[in-house]
Image (cartoon, grey):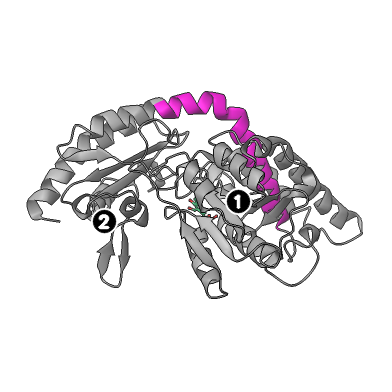
Amino acid sequence: MSERIIYLDHAATTALDPRILDAMLPYFTTEYGNASSIYTLGRHAMQAIDHSREQVAELLHARPSEIAFVGCGTESDNLAIKGMAFAAQQKKGKHIITTPIEHHAVLHTCQYLERFGFTITYLPVDEYGMVNPDDVERSITDQTCLVSVMYANNEVGTIEPIAEIGRICRARKVPFHVDAVQAGGALPIDVQELKADMLSLSAHKFYGPKGVGILYTRQGMRILPQMQGGSQERGRRAGTENVAGIVGAATALELAYAELPQVTPRIQALRDRLIEGILRIPRSRLTGHPTRRLPNNASFAFEGVEGESILLNLDLLGVAASTGSACTSGSVDPSHVLVAMGLPPEWSHGSLRLTLGKRNTEEEIETVIDALPGIIERLRGLGI
Ligand code: PLP
């Protein structure tokens, strides 16, 4: 089955690169020690984790002590936001600033904090999903304990002005968290340049294993752990370390950045061809920023169709894609990202996200360009 699949959903997840699997395998079999054990086998595991931490730190321009390995991108976001909110609330206040286009890992965490008396300001975004740094400046009060803005949006690919926002937060002494889960391995990340105080990544987005997240926390930033237990990860994340996963995450990040100069121009050219071909469909539009977008992201809206119907029809042709719409209790809700960008309902229901990866071919792209106009026309004729 997998041979026939045209996989265009790399923002959802990526296939583990065989070279990364090779790096991980010994830690499932021969090097199975617990990193907390003091005998040789345990020390080998700890050495592998230490080495992985150094690799990640170097790639992000951070110190090894600032890197913590956690269970996924969602956990990294939760630990950053709750960890900082609960640690800083007394010294600062209970005000958090974020955007309405964040991933649910951020949005639902902020909503959860409302139960503890935190108030949340959602910054406006423009029609492309861009945040204006001036709005960050205006929203900060003496009660603000955290600003959290994503580096690149997972649905429409828009790249946010993180360095500008970082400068403002640093000047106002407000901790700044960046959800860089979609940017990791795709855009260079320098935590010094971005002035990020915390930054979240997830290995399965850059050809690493699922179930491994990374949290950068700048030295001097105090966060409260969100799980009680052992003192692993310098007390930031209790629980026996996923050694194979950690090795996989670090290897994946290293490979992604080593290959970036070759991979990005190729993917971007295929992506541009896809956009050009698909925008020939009547009543179609590109969503997200026309130029400031992730190199692999092609996202669209089609007037008068349901995104889920497009997906099902593409699936029949072996094409894996995604829509921002979510089916909740029998009705289809448009994506919160497109709603925040002001897209009218006749358009926002018909969203399609195609995200490319390093193995996609020109032929695959042409197949989709050929198939999609007929699918949209048929669905419009059927009124779905
Ligand atoms: N943040 C963003 C922007 C994402 O795109 C995702 C996953 O799609 C996450 C967080 C959550 O990451 P994970 O799937 O590793 O929990």
Q: Secondary structure at mark 2?
A: helix
In this view, which residue lies farthest toward the left? 381
- Reply above or below: 125 against 240: above
* Alpha-carbon span between mark 1 and mark 2: 33 Å
Question: In this view of the protein, which residue sits in the foreground, 14 or 335?
Answer: 335
In the rendered structure, does residue 135 fall within the stretch colored magenta?
A: no
Check mark 2 vs ligand 1: CB closer than 8 Å? yes or no: no
Left or right: 7 in relation to 254? left
Left or right: 239 in relation to 111? right
Left or right: 73 in relation to 8? right
Which segment is the magenta one?
242-268
Q: Identify the residue shown where x is 51% and y is 28%.
A: 263
> Magenta residues: mostly which secondary structure?
helix
- Reply above or below: 167 against 197: above
The residue type indicated by label 1 comes to His
10 Å crowding of disc 1: few (<14), some (14-19), many (20+)? many
Q: Which mark is residue 308?
A: 2
Question: In this view of the protein, which residue sits in the foreground, 206 or 78?
Answer: 78
Looking at the picture, how far across and down is residue 307, in whole percent? 25, 53
Q: Confirm or deny contact between disc 1 and disc 2 (CB under 8 A).
A: no
The residue type indicated by label 2 comes to Glu
In this view, which residue lies farthest toward the bottom? 115
Question: In this view of the protein, which residue sits in the foreground, 361 or 59?
Answer: 59
Q: Earlier in the sequence, mark 1 or mark 2?
A: 1
In this view, which residue lies farthest toward the right? 39
Q: Secondary structure at mark 1?
A: strand
Q: Which mark is residue 177?
A: 1
Looking at the picture, how far across and down is residue 116, in whole percent? 57, 75
Q: Please state, as top left, top right, bottom left or bottom right, where the C terminus lies in the image.
A: bottom left
- Reply above or below: 158 against 215: above
Q: Identify the residue shown where x is 77% and y is 49%.
A: 219
10 Å crowding of disc 2: few (<14), some (14-19), many (20+)? many
